[in-house]
Image (spheres, rainbow, N blue to C red):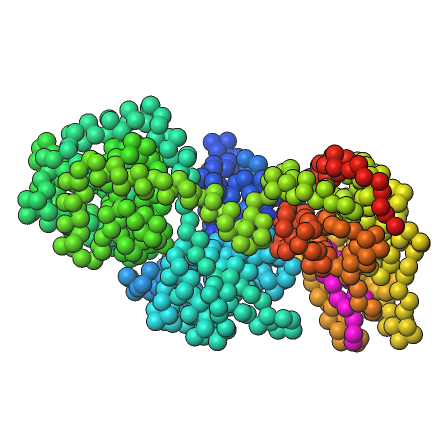
Amino acid sequence: MTAPEPIRDDELYVDHVYDMIVVSNRLPVDYESGSDGQTQWKSSPGGLVTALEPVMRAADGAWIGWAGVADREFDPFEHDGISIIPVPLSESELEEYYEGFSNDTLWPLYHDVIAPPSFHREWWEAYVRVNRRFAEAAARAASDGAVVWVHDYQLQLVPRMLREKRPDLVIGFFNHIPFPAYGIYSQLPWRRQVLDGLLGADVIGFQRAADAGNFSRAVRRLFGHPTRGTVIEVPGDREESRRVVARHFPISIDAAGFEEIARRPEVQQRAREIRESLGNPETIMLGVDRLDYTKGIRHRIKAFGELLHEGRLDVESTILVQVASPSRERVETYRQLRDEIELAVGRINGDYSTLEHQAIAYLHHGYPREEMVALYLAADVMLVTALRDGMNLVAKEYVASRFDDDGVLLLSEFTGASDELRQAVLVNPHDIEGLKDAFVEAVRMPKRERSRRMRALRKRVRDNDVAKWSATFLETLTGAGIIRPGVPESLLSALNRIAETERLLVALDFDGTLAPLVDRPEDARATIRARGAIERLASSEDTRVAIVSGRALDSLNEVASPPDGTLLSGSHGVELQLDAGVATIDLRDAELAKLERLSSILDDVAATADGAWIEEKPAGRALHTRKLNAEAGTALQKVARDKVAGELVGITVRTGKAVLEFAVRSSDKGESLTRLRQHVGATATIYVGDDVTDEDAFAALDAEDIGVKVGQGKSIATFRVRSPEDVAEMLELLADARDAARGAPSRWP
């Protein structure tokens, strides 16, 4: 049998770009081969999918990950409304990148060396290679300024790789497992490379505050970067330093979903059947874990066995049900762990079970969610005795399922969940005597005390569910979180307030704000609703409308077809069309000479890429790359930036969406907005824009003004809407509010 051809990173291709991308080792779907030989995909829903599904749908999102099958390549596809982009892994990469470096180097190291980690250079090389493949796929799939959210320890190098290829992106990373103290982390031979990879992100999330602190301390020790609170200052190569946020965002579950399942009559009936099948004991103690040495399964079995030996518990009244789902069975450490646990279970059952009553019911396989919820309802005591765990969602699943306000959660203090679920019985699983006492306390706890604790636990889980987790992370990352369609109530209130002002200036960007973005800029047109709302506002007394664009004024006039009386700002304020006519900044001879040389340089650059073109502006030139794929466009812009920087000084460079603008005379939308305000004597202003260049205008607003950012991306604007269609609705509501508020005679100069 011949070995498969190695996977080439440059063969990964996507024919569509997305505004929101999730990158994780595994896709949210599992591959199944149908009986007819056709490829089938089955959803593998989990907390992460539940949290991100509404975000993906709202923001035109895609999910990048491995399909779970080695040496197979799959084309991108749609599944249940989510775009899926599979990344292939070879069998050797699965062994070295995943089973090797991820799970036999990083996993034990990050879990406080409960098992000894292995360090192999070939594993590290595979880890780098696979991380680069994921980064390549994300770079190709991301639209300009897209949000990319990378997940977990298998992909820690992706943020830096992605930032180097696509500096326009907003990049987040979330680490689902612990991050160790420096004394442990420092053992990693590639410790600097991993930290540098993570520092490519804008926001790095951890499960616990202690994990975020460990990371920041490691950065200070190894790089000397200044840190203040949760902010790390990361120096740039040729640009200003970046601020990276490293803080905790404790993950959670779909609490309402688990409660809904638990309330189903058939699930409650199944819970009763489970108790009956176990002999209707007084107490069922339950452990649900992946078969992993970090979960403390051996410790709880040892403690339970000693309690039976001492007579403090007996098999007639108490049974331990241990669900240990298979995990990494090709790794030798995990095979040994299974042998040890099954030997211990067999010994205890042999010593203490009777014909009528089993001491331990040991189940080495997974169950569907409905069966797990039935087990949670059947269990009187939930045992979570992990030696080290980033969070442990089983604890939260148990609490969410207990709508009857009964049951006891016994929880290791070495889990992230213990930071939140303080009403659980907290234990140190290494202290076997203390663990035994906690078992007995949980079994004998009065019902009133059980209910009091469970009510408090359930409120905590309900108030901090997985949707809140994802929204909090994305809000920190983008300043926006999940952008719902329509006009939010907070913005509507602000519109009603500003409509009362004496003289209102409504200033609007054009491309991506009034008009959807298109491949050919000359084809852009404002939506019908937006144009109608602008005409209404322009006809209102004491209201002026201005369109503020990076386009040259001639181009803006052509595509916008502005209503009479509309003020125009083109070329980022270099050109202004006011009531008295057009005002353009005159260039000096030296600036004209620079402009001529700039044109020559950019023409040469654009000629190397089919689809790139140069737009002439009065004080500069713009390189447009929208017709190129995002990665090729970014690369071409870098070439242009470097060549211009190498030959010309004093050139202002401005990055927009698929456009790089160079100006020999500095001006921006903030300066333009200030001139427009002064010209009309506005007492209040609303500015709406979608691009990086609009941030200058948002910065020029006063406290009583309104700034509205369209779409995702970092912004200092106070409010957000999702799309040009929502902008149109917002302008209609503003026109309604202005009509209701007007009445005084016009006071425009």
- Image quadrant in which you'd find residue 618: bottom right
- Image quadrant in which you'd find residue 210: bottom left
Which residue is depicted at the point 91% across and 59% down?
Answer: 583
Q: Nearer the viewer, residue 340 or 210?
A: 210
Farthest front residue in view: 744
Q: Is residue 454 left or right of residue 250?
A: left
- Image quadrant in which you'd find residue 400: top left
Give x and y (percent) for residue 340: 20, 52
Total marks shown come to 0
Q: Nearer the viewer, residue 493 or 630?
A: 493
Q: Is residue 151 magenta?
A: no
Main secondary structure type of the part rendered in magenta: strand
Q: Is residue 660 magenta?
A: yes
Which residue is depicted at the point 29% across and 56% down?
Answer: 414
Whether residue 519 is visible: no
Give x and y (percent) for residue 574: 85, 61
Q: Nearer the viewer, residue 565 or 681?
A: 681
Give x and y (percent) for residue 251: 42, 49
Which residue is depicted at the point 42% across and 70% down?
Answer: 218
Whether residue 587 is visible: yes
- Please state the extent of the stretch shown in magenta in the rendering: 649-663
Give x and y (percent) for residue 705: 69, 51
Q: Is residue 631 left or right of residue 413?
A: right
Q: Is residue 617 left or right of residue 465?
A: right
Which residue is depicted at the point 37% across and 42% down?
Answer: 461
